[in-house]
Amino acid sequence: MLEPFYCPTSVAVIGASRDETKLGHAVVKNLLECGYQGRIYPINLKDDEILGLQAYASVLTVPGDIELTVVVVPDRFVATVLEECGQKGVRGVVVITAGFREVGGEGLKKEKELVDIVRRYDMRMLGPNCLGVIDTICPLNASFARGMPQQGEIAMMSQSGALLMAIHDWALGEGVGFSRFVSLGNKADIDETDLLQLWDDDPHTKVIVAYLEGIADGPEFMKIAEHVGRETPIIAIKAGTSDAGARAVSSHTGTLAGSERAYDAAFKQAGITRADSVEELFQYAHAFSEATPIKGDRIAVVSNAGGAAIMATDALDRAHLQLATFQRETIELLQRQLPPGSNALNPVDVRGDSDAEMYRFALDAVLRDGNVDGVIAILIPQAVTKVDETAHAIIEVVRQHDKPVLSSFMGKNLADVGVEILRDADIPNYSYPEPAVDAMRAMVERWRWLEKPPRTMKRFDVDRKKVEQAFAAVRDDGRVKVGDAEARQIMEAYGFTIPQSELARDPDEAVAIAEKIGYPVVMKVTSPDILHKTDIGGVKLNIMSASDVRDAFDLLMYRAYRYMPQAEVWGALVQEMVPQGKEVIIGVNRDPQFGPLLLLGLGGIYVEILKDASFRIAPVARWEAEEMIGELRSAPLLHGIRGEKPSDLGAIVDCVLRVSQLAVDFPEIVELDINPLMVHEEGKGAVALDMRLILS
């Protein structure tokens, strides 16, 4: 259905104008000047001719078929012209006109009307409030952006028309080529997921880049991006995550989570390379579209300056990439051939007075080494440096090997001749070593993602009916916060090991429960309104006698009513005292775009202070849960240090997967913490001591 936006056989511009200051004039002029070979129909109520083309009062009076229309009339007329487009049988519309959802109120209502019209006539709409669409392959410039980018292999989508205009102008100045160039605007119909599907297996596109301010359907976007990204790298910059995801939360997970975390997790799982700036966006795009894909993380550096080589080495360490260890044969070869004072180990320094042939030899020797997966080639113009000859030497060597080489010709005046030569040969060049290393890191991360196994989800045999009954009891009671008794019911239903426990409503009942369980016991104040019990002193540990139970009950009730006098207090939970282990937190915070955001971290009372956590979008595969453990700074504590036995990592993984399944099975779960999950030694399992859960 999106073919009309590729290379339509005919384009009508509704709102075409003779006035050079009007957007309708600019769009017609762009269509004429870009080399578009199809029919162009200017639509204008008053004029008979525009820029040498016959004009028509309406699309309904055009004698031939119209495949694509570009709408640039005032917002109050857009619905009417879309009705006419539908009656004419138009398949695609680009609504450049603004004044819809972005202005709120009445504008949102008008935008919904446009969507109703395009749905009724089975049309597809780009916009409204967009720049338009450019296709260099067709060629087609159905936008009001002046000039046509060079033909290239980068497809770009942007939710910001102004940013796209700036990038378009930059591309013209830098000679950067694109295959497709699309402004999404308000995304009332066509969105980022539609474009990913459109560009899937596009023979003219090697890399997809995107500027996004929001994603309409997060799970669908992830699914399509994961599929498309297997063949075509996707690089995205996501704006507006600093405060946009902030909302009132009461759980630890909710405090630590948010829009930024969700996008990071979603992009990681879908294999999308995230850029933090427009500059990074295109640094990565050059590497992905021009360099040979990397097949490992062992990187070598070849340089004619020691200082620059050290800068690259430091950057590789910060990027967690391996500095390749050369094979003995490579080291001996370099030692024999390089001039005195050179460094034959990695990083290779061929010295500033070496000629292009010596640089070619060193780069070739390094690329032939089986321990090297990619190379950063650095050149600083010095007194005797032949910049142009060295650039040609690099090109010659790169074409003989199936490994990526990213160059960094540092400088401006003297280096520019080499940069131009490399650019013409599609060798990515970076002004400094650090961005070259960063681009190499992005390539390595993509290789690692491609090497991961399929995301197959394990499902446990659980009792969903019991959870439904627990949630119904909460709803019937007029609550959204799940109490301790319901939480135990939910955890049992989903296979968690929990300690023996019962709710006591008075001291005598507490003593009876404690003696049935056996000392020592733990006591916790129980209230749907008190989620963080330790904050008010609502937990007592290691209670050893009946008198201590009575005292603890009275103290817990006193503290509950003193610190939260409006709280509904049900009594005290008397619980089996579980042996000490490592405290872990597993949580869920439901993100409005992507759904359940899983958290795994160091648990207990320090979770929000240490902020040592890993995130994923549920559901997750077993290997993803294992990755979450490995990403924690505290992971060495779980593996066992200084003679401690390892914790039961398999039990942690199982618990993560059970929480993942629970969150997917019940979309009404807004926030959930299991904190702490007490993890015992390897082979001895884990016990869920406490759960906080809030429903929508």
Image (cartoon, rainbow, N blue to C red):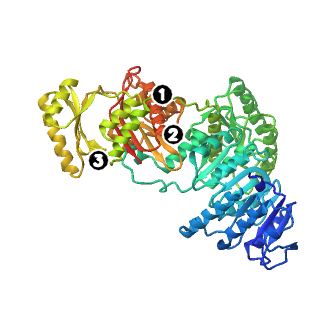
Give the mark nearer the N terminus: 1 vs 3: 1
Q: What amino acid is at disc 3? A: Asp
- The picture places residue 4, in percent across and down from the top left corner, at 78, 55
Q: Residue 602: name its quadrant.
A: top left
Give the mark nearer the N terminus: 2 vs 3: 3
The label on residue 616 is 2
Find the residue positioned furthest to the left.
547
Contact, mark 2 vs mark 1 (Cβ under 8 Å): no
Choose mark 2 or mark 3, whichever is in front. Answer: 3
Element type where label 2 sits in the image: strand
Choose mark 2 or mark 1, whichever is in front. Answer: 1
Spatial CA span between label 2 and label 1: 19 Å
Element type where label 3 sits in the image: loop
**Residue to which mark 1 is pinned:** 460
Q: Is residue 443 left or right of residue 362?
A: left
| Mark 1 surroundings within 10 Å by alpha-carbon count, few (fewer than 14), some (14 through 19), many (20 or more) | few
Q: In this view, does 551 lie to the left or right of 187?
A: left
Residue situated in front as seen by the camera: 300 or 263: 263
**Image label count:** 3
Q: In this view, does 694 lie to the left or right of 619?
A: left
| Mark 3 surroundings within 10 Å by alpha-carbon count, few (fewer than 14), some (14 through 19), many (20 or more) | some
**Residue to which mark 3 is pinned:** 529
Element type where label 1 sits in the image: loop
Give the mark nearer the N terminus: 2 vs 1: 1
Taking the spot 58% from the left edge, 52% from the top edge, the residue there is: 216
Q: What amino acid is at disc 1? A: Phe
